[in-house]
Image (cartoon, rainbow, N blue to C red):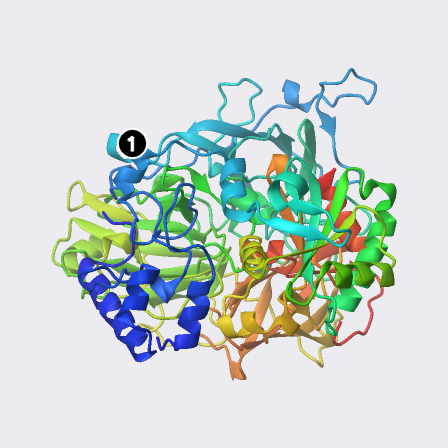
Amino acid sequence: MHPLKFRPARLAEIARKNRQDILEAGVSRRELIRLGLLTGSGCLIPVRGLSARASCEAGACQPGCSPPTDPFVDPLPIPAVLPERPLTDPGFRIAPAAQPSGQPEDARAEPHQFRDRFPPQQFFISRMRPNPAFRFSESPANLARIPAQTIWGFNLGGASPGDVATTPGPTIVSRYGTPIVVRRFNELVPDDTGFGRTEVSTHLHNFHSGPDSDGGPCDPVFTRFFGTGQFYDYFYTMARAGFDTAEFRASNGDIRETLGTLWYHDHRVDHTAENTYKGLAGFHYVFNEFDTGNENTGFRFPSFPQFDVPLFLADKLFTPEGQICFDPFGFDGIVGDKFVVNGRMQPFFEVQKRRYRFRVLAGGPSRFYQLFLTNPDNPDQSIPFWLIANDGNLLPRPVELTSTRLGVAERMDVIVDFRKIWDRFGHPRRIWLENRLEQVNGRAPTDRILPPGNPANAVLEFRLAGPDIVADGSFDPEPVSYPHVPCGPDDCVFAPICLPRLPSDTAAAPTDRIRLTRSFRFDRTNGQWAVNDRLMDCTRFRFTVQRNTAERWILRNSSGGWQHPLHIHLEEFRIIRRNGRAVSCGDPEFSRKDVLRLGFNDEVEVVTRFRDFRGGYPMHCHNTVHEDHQMMLLWQIQDTGDNLTEP
Amino acid sequence: MAITRRDLLAALAVAPMTSALTARATPADRSAAQPRLSGRERIRRQHLPNVALTAHTGARLMFYDDLVKDKKVIINFMYAKCAGICPPVTMNLTRVQKLLGDRVGRDIFMYSITLKPAEDTVEALRDYAVEHQTGPGWWFLTGSPPDVEHLRRALGFTYADPVEDADTSNHIGMLRYGVEPLTRWAACPGMANPAHIVRSILWDLD
């Protein structure tokens, strides 16, 4: 298969179009030949955008230069579940400061907020390590092109070298009501791959964490990233937002603020893109008494782990010699030409003819996705699926879709019913999860939807197998989904996990009243990211939010031809308006969110509460290359807030 | 996609294209023919060209061999007559140099490369350095226009939009800093708070 994302017919068409454009621009045929863009026979070399860097010399790290590989030859790997460990595990012995060197050192310099109130009941260890023999494919043909090589990952917590790190790392599974500590060791070492920073800070995106355990990038006082030979204890209350407010203290938080699908990833300031790209990321599921992981109880979502499957989508670049590469001098972002799901290139996944829950994550560094289910033998079919959660937050009513957009770090929980697909779409034996959004650079997608049925765009092939009738105790979202059922603002199919009350300008309770409206204009000045004309500063907070209040933020993209998936740490927000238009029921964004896509010239209004914790958090672009070029600001939450409306 | 003659020639003027595109081998040939490059070598080839430069002191220096190899460096682009962001960035960098103290010139080196090599002669850059009271270990560099342009592109001080890129007065106000032997590279805005710049730089250079 050719690595370029076009079939030969389309390539020829592009080449013809380019040639015509060039001739119209008044460049002679001789000039073109001299410049190497036209071959003797008159065929234009198919170089997208006529980039002068489109040659694939040794070590080239750009789209179109990865070696060709065969798709759908590897089974989809499912990350292991991180095992719980007893406190007698040697990994929990904290080395006293006086111990001889060589002992791991505790990097944490501040107490865990609310740890006394929520004593940890479960303990986990994971070690960040190099894996020097990681395979993006097991097939001999692919391995000849892309050999086993070094990535970074997380292991299952064991100290022995045999406990190998993988990417994605193990899935952490926890439950509301059971507070946990995850001790993360940094055992990374420098290598000769050309990228990867051996200091780390692990963010649990977007758990309601104290700044001590948020794994944020930087802070005026605390340095929360840590180096090789150190560890850091991350404490998660496993309580819902609002647990330290008058209204929800007794219930340990507002049940409507339940989170489900989270992911952890490195957040080392200025190096998040390369470290996450190199593998430092994984899933973290949170179950509860309703979303139980068992299809015979609660909301009866497909059972974990067999039918509740994470899909970590990533796109990578390899040099022509088959080495994963990262361009640390790039500013726009990185768009890979190899799709990797759960660590394998374009894998296949054998499914039974029943319902599955897929937790789909756009893992970055820069790519947006528009995902479709495609029957490759009949690509014009429009195959539905059901969205049940956006960014891990259950929707008030499932929404039937035939495609969904994801920006970096967004998660979509979808129910795919292979039994219905089998019955309704002519017994297909394979179905692709296909990304049809064209994106040719890291700045933004073109927003053009590519034609269906191109294997280069298939991130994953589902293979329908087994008997036609199989047991399926899971909930069928179709009969209650929008638009089969009209939606309403007070919908709550998954009661009691309904949408929380929206804060308003007139509410009586401080946590329900919008105390302040702040505006943020995302712009570039001399090619540098600015927010309200000011640059990133790790030495000070831009503004202070008053604890246990709500605010309205207006976010504007004034950066020209760029799109940005913006992420706000601490609490989920609600998108109220996009470009003046109210986001209403039936819209996938009629949901709690923690990432919002800021499209070309968009103006988006969000409302958020800021509860429970004190301290500093960032808001940043989750195109991690933009983030590492400091498209970020720091804010803090304290008992008294300021009134800066354009901070 | 409408391409103007100007866009095209601007895009092509960029880099040593010669026969690279037509000589493009099939991927299979490449894998078979070429040994793997280390990350450091790959970055050297693609981003750290060994072009000849002249410093404001008159010293003749090769960019990779003399200025970057095995060093901790801070790099930006400017020009002496720039009235836009150059004065504040240079002012910022003098503060950064003070905050870094005698490490500049000892184990950290600062390079300000001109965007207008034709007008920024050694004398012009020397006057600029004197005027801004820069200390030792901070080099103002010029060279032949094609070499300097090659260097600017290799170091990523470019806009994707050729029109935007052609506007020198709006040039990229970034500082690139790194530790060459460790392939550790990062960037921050040159106009940022100097305390933030120094903190970011030392997080990576130390």
Q: Which residue is mark 1?
A: A144
Please identify the quarter of the rendering in which residue A387 is found. bottom left
In screen coordinates, is B115 left or right of A443? right
Compared across the picture, whether B136 is left or right of A569 comes to: right
User: Which is nearer the eye, A252 or A618?
Assistant: A618
Q: Is residue A114 visible?
A: no
Residue at 70% x, 40% y is: B72
Percent of width and height locating residue B40: 54, 36
Q: Is residue A69 above or below residue B124?
A: above
**Residue furthest to the bottom:** A580
Along the line of sight, the residue nearer the viewer: A240 or B134? B134
The C terminus of chain A: image quadrant: bottom right
> Can residue A325 be seen here?
yes
Q: Residue at x 74, y 51 (%)?
A: B58
Q: Secondary structure at mark 1?
A: helix
- Image coordinates of residue A226 in percent, x first then y, are 70, 36
Q: Whole-percent x and y of residue B67? A: 67, 43
The picture quadrant where one finds residue A574 is bottom right
Q: Nearer the viewer, residue A626 or A251?
A: A626
Residue found at x 43% / y 31%: A149
In the displayed structure, B39 sits above or below B10; it is above
Whole-percent x, y for residue A545 in the image: 77, 65
Q: Amino acid at mark 1?
A: Ala
- Residue in the image at 71% along x and 18% along y: A102
Chain under disc 1:
A
Q: Determine the residue located farthest toward the top in the rendered image.
A: A100
Q: Please tell me whether residue B120 is drawn above or below residue A132 in the rendered image.
A: below
